[in-house]
Amino acid sequence: MENIREAKFEAYQKLMTVGLEKWAQSKCPVRRYSCLTSNAAESFNGRLLWARRLPICLLIEGIRMVIEKWFDERHEAAKSIQQDITPEAHRKLTEEMEKARRYDVVPTSESVYKVKDGRSTIMVDLDSVSAKSGT
């Protein structure tokens, strides 16, 4: 990173603004298939490097085996889940609920609420299911 910062400071700033987890495989917070990558095609291609030199029929069998294994692993993991949502979705919802505990919600009518989060104010109309930024 120091080399990038010294060579191209603008590029370094852009990468840091985007966040390491978006482009650095080692910082990715989720498991992406059996490889660390942000692109499913890259992951799949990387997983099948061993089979690329095989004749087409064996290559297709290798692809089938990899996909079958992935589905089986995910099926087994899903059977152990005790909730209606995935652990990752549960974690995200829990984080958002913790943030929401600090919001100040003031009703302005039967279905319209003013929500303050300390930085901004948002008007939420539950009848129209929309949120509009305020002051």
Image (cartoon, rainbow, N blue to C red):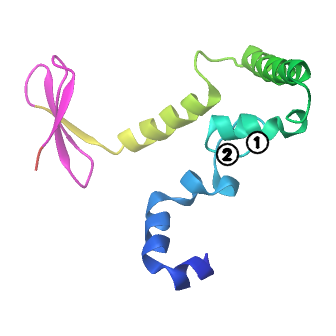
Residue range highlighted in magenta: 108-133
Question: Which numbered circle lies on residue 35?
Answer: 1
Residue 2 counted in the magenta span? no
Residue at 85 percent across and 35 percent down: it is 52
Q: Is residue 5 visible?
A: yes
The quadrant in which the N terminus is found is bottom right
Please state the horizontal and vertical placement of residue 132, each as a whole percent of the image.
15, 36
| Badge 1 element | loop
Please tell me which residue lies in front, 73 or 14.
14
Q: Is residue 31 visible?
A: no
Please tell me which residue lies in front, 129 or 104.
129
Q: Is residue 98 above or below residue 112?
A: below
The reply to whether the C-beta atoms of the residues labelled 2 and 1 are less than 8 Å apart is yes
Please state the horizontal and vertical placement of residue 98, each as a whole percent of the image.
45, 41
State the separation of the CA atoms marked 2 and 1: 6 Å
Q: Is residue 47 above or below residue 82?
A: below
Q: Which residue lies most toward the front here?
A: 55
Q: How many marks?
A: 2
- Residue hosting label 2: 37
